[in-house]
Image (tube, rainbow, N blue to C red):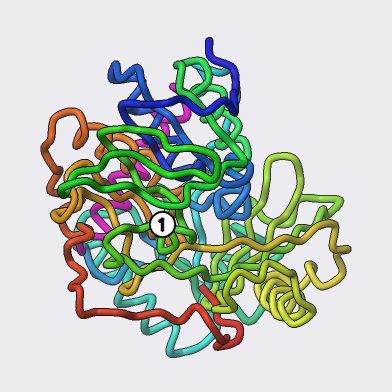
Amino acid sequence: MAARSNQLPEKSEIIIIGGGVIGLSIARALALRGVRDVTMIERAEFGREASWAAGGILAPQVEADAADDFFRLASASRDLYPQFAEALLNETGIDIELDRTGTLYVAFTEAEEAEFRARFDWQQSEGLAVEWLSGDEARALEPALSNHVRCALRFPNDLQVENRRLIEALLVSNRQLGVQLIDHCQVKSIRVTAGQVAGVETPSEFISCRIVVMAAGAWTSAIDPTTRVEIEPVRGQMLCFRPELKLVRHVVYSSRGYLIPRRDGRLIAGSTSERVGFDKQVTREGITAIRSMAAEIAPPVATLRLVDSWAGFRPRAQDDSPVVGPSDEIDGLCYATGHYRNGILLAPVTGALVAEMIISKSVSPLIVPFSPDRFQRTVSVSTRSGSDGIKWH
C-alpha cells in the first residue's frame, strides 16, 4: 500500500497533471487495469478545487434538449455511478452517498412551462424516464415548494453524490493501488522532443515519462504545450444551510439555480457563474442572489441561517464542452479537462475511457466529438479578464 509521498521520482511511465476528480478517476482506472507506474502531480491539495466546491449533481436529463453527443456521454457516466459507488465502498469502506431519489425541475412562468413540455415530449419519445407534474402534484411531493410553481418535471434516474466523500474515496483507492501521489507541486511545462512527450518540468526538477494526461482543470492553459486548448476559470459560489427539519428530498432545480439536500441534514444552494479570473472570494452579491433563488424555489429557506459558503473555479473550454482525447500534434499527450459544470458527473466515464485509450490506443466513439483537435490554431478565445456579472447555471 503506497502512502502519499512528495518525493519526486526521476521518471514515471504516466504522469497525470491535476489531482481533482477527473485525474483521480483516470489514475484509479489505469491502476485497476494493471498499469503500475502512474504518478499524479497536484499544484495544491488533492480534490480541493472544483471537485470540492461542486454540488455533486448527476442530472444529464434536466437541461437536455436533444440526445446529442454530450447527452450520450453524460448519460453513460451517470449510469456507471451505481457500480462506481459500490466498487469504491468495497475498496475503501467509504460510502459516497449516492442518492437515487431523483431530480425535480420546477417552472414558474408560462414560457418555462412551454419549454418543459417540449423537453418532456422529446425525452418521453426517446424512452427516457421523465414524469410531468402539475404544480399541486409537485407540492404534494415536496411541500416546501413555492405556491408559484406552475408545473415540474421529475427525472427519477438522475442522481446526486456527496462529492467530498467521493474525493476521499478516490484518494484512498489510489493510495491502495500504488499510485504515486504528489501534492503541492506545480508543473511548469511539458517537455516535448521531436513531437513526443519527454516529461514534465517542476520548479525543482525534471521528471521523464512517455505519457502525460492533462487533467489540470482551470489551470490547463498555463501548461498546455500546444496553446490550442483554451480553458478559463468560471467562478461558482455556493451556500450551505442546516434546517432543523429536512425541507426537500429531491435535488430541486429552477432556471436560476438549485437546492441539494444532503444525507446529514445540510441543504446546499447554488450556484453563480462568473468570469472573474482566479478570484475565489464569496461576495455579498453572490450570497444575495443565491438566497433569492433558493427562497423562490422553497420560501422556508428565507428564514434559514447561513452556516457555510465557498467558491470554486469551473474549467470552461471555448465551446462549453469537455476536452478529452489524444493530441494529434504531440505523441503521448492526452487531454481530460474542460469539464466545466460536469466534472463530478463525467468522472467515471472519463476515467474508464481515457484509461482504455492509453492502454489499447483506441478512442471510444463516445469521446471522439470532444477531441482537443476540434480547436484550430487560429482560434484564440479567452475571457479570463473582466466579469460579465452573475449568471445562473
Q: Is residue 315 left or right of residue 108?
A: left
Q: Is residue 57 magenta?
A: no
Q: Is residue 242 left or right of residue 188?
A: right
Res. 97 in view: no
Q: Residue at x 49, y 50 (%)?
A: 102
Count of all numbered marks drawn on residues in the image: 1
Residue sitting at x 87%, y 69%: 303
Which residue is label 1 attached to? 223
Left or right, 274 with respect to 343, comes to right
Looking at the image, the residue that sits furthest to the top is 1
Judge whether 319 appears above or below 90 on screen.
below
- Magenta stretch: give its range: 68-87
Q: Residue at x 17, y 62 (%)?
A: 373
SS label for mark 1: loop
Q: Who is closer to the viewer here, 329 or 128?
A: 329
Whole-percent x, y for residue 301 in the image: 78, 67
- Spot occupied by residue 248 in the image (x, y as percentages of width and height): 67, 56
310 with respect to 350 (left or right): right
Q: Is residue 161 visible?
A: yes
- Other residues around mark 1 within 10 Å, as few (<14) / some (14–19) / many (≥20): some
Q: Is residue 253 above or below residue 275?
A: above
- Coordinates of residue 147 in the picture (x, y in percent): 67, 78
| Residue 334 higher or lower than 319, as above or below | above
Could you tell me what secondary structure mostly forms the magenta stretch? helix
Residue at 20% across, 73% down = 377
| Residue type of the residue flagged with mark 1 | Ile
Would you identify the image quadrant in which residue 67 lies?
bottom left
Q: Position of residue 360 (x, y in %)?
A: 13, 30
Q: Looking at the image, which is closer to me, 167 or 3?
A: 3
Q: Nearer the viewer, residue 305 or 170?
A: 170
